[in-house]
Amino acid sequence: MLFEKLKKNANTCNNNIRIETKNLHCDFERAISKAAKTIFPNTNIKYCIWHYKKSLEIKKNKLCYNEVKNNNNIFIYYKAISNLPFINPEYIFDIYVIIKIKSIKNNYCQFLKFLEYFYKTYLIDYDMKIWNYYNNIEHITNNASESLNNYLNNLFPTKPSFYELIDKLNELEHLSYYDYQRKIRGIWKIKKRTINKANEISVLIERFKSIEAKLIDAKCDRNKIINLWFDCLTNLNNII
């Protein structure tokens, strides 16, 4: 119903010009993404990486906390799984298989349960392209919408009327140009560390993309490219 209202009101306010959303960032909520796709079929759905990592952390703590804490190799594998959204999705399953084979060989029983959870949840139940940001690392969370929600909650301790909300939004629109533009991009508080980290990730991924292109041009074996992206995950462990 919310998406229907948004589309209807947007078209009404724009003289019946057709309005289509381009991107929707949200939590791992199938109901939200399904509803959005129904109303805006061309929408590009992207799930929040923070929620992806948080979900993995909760499951790790439940299934294999001690193994991950006490074994550095398992810790590296766990971190690799948590950073898979950043690498070329073509090789994600291959890397998962490598980690699983090594875990079986070394009898990492608890961690294997975690890997089974990851496989069923993120490689089977969810479409990988929805949680993979290999080609767009600029916006990897839904922090902008959550920040806006928190910002509005602070503005209105009690639920405002429709007209009170519009008046306040009009007031915000007349802020200084820079401040307003910053806010409509979702940057409600400048967090240099977060921005720098995203830039670091982007630079690293672009470097490995370039290496991958050279390996492909040289007609290298696929296993070399898989190992390349495994190395990338190790490098990402030093950033994230």
Image: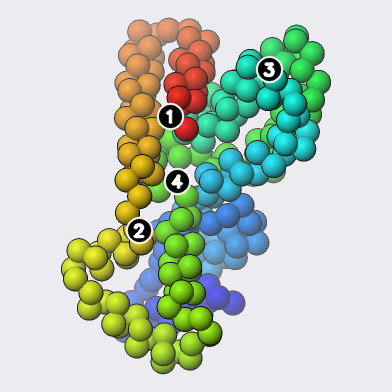
Mark 4 against mark 3, which lies toward the viewer?
3
Q: Earlier in the sequence, mark 1 or mark 2?
A: 2
Where does the image place residue 11, in percent across and percent down from the top left? 39, 80
Q: Residues within 10 Å of mark 3 (few under 14, many from 20)?
A: few
Residue that numbered label 3 is attached to: 71
Where does the image place residue 188, in percent across and percent down from the top left? 36, 61
At x 38%, y 44%, the residue is: 194
* Amino acid carrying mark 3 in the image: Asn
Query: Dots 1 and 2: beta carbons under 8 Å?
Result: no
Q: Depth check: give the residue in front, 205 or 111.
A: 111
Query: Distance of mark 2 from mark 4, alpha carbons?
Result: 17 Å
Query: Distance of mark 4 from mark 3, alpha carbons?
Result: 29 Å
Tell me the SS state at disc 1.
loop
Residue that numbered label 2 is attached to: 189
* Amino acid carrying mark 2 in the image: Lys
Above or below residue 17? Residue 238 is: above
Query: Distance of mark 1 from mark 3, alpha carbons?
Result: 20 Å
Residue that numbered label 1 is attached to: 239
* Amino acid carrying mark 1 in the image: Ile
Per the rendering, the mark at residue 140 is: 4
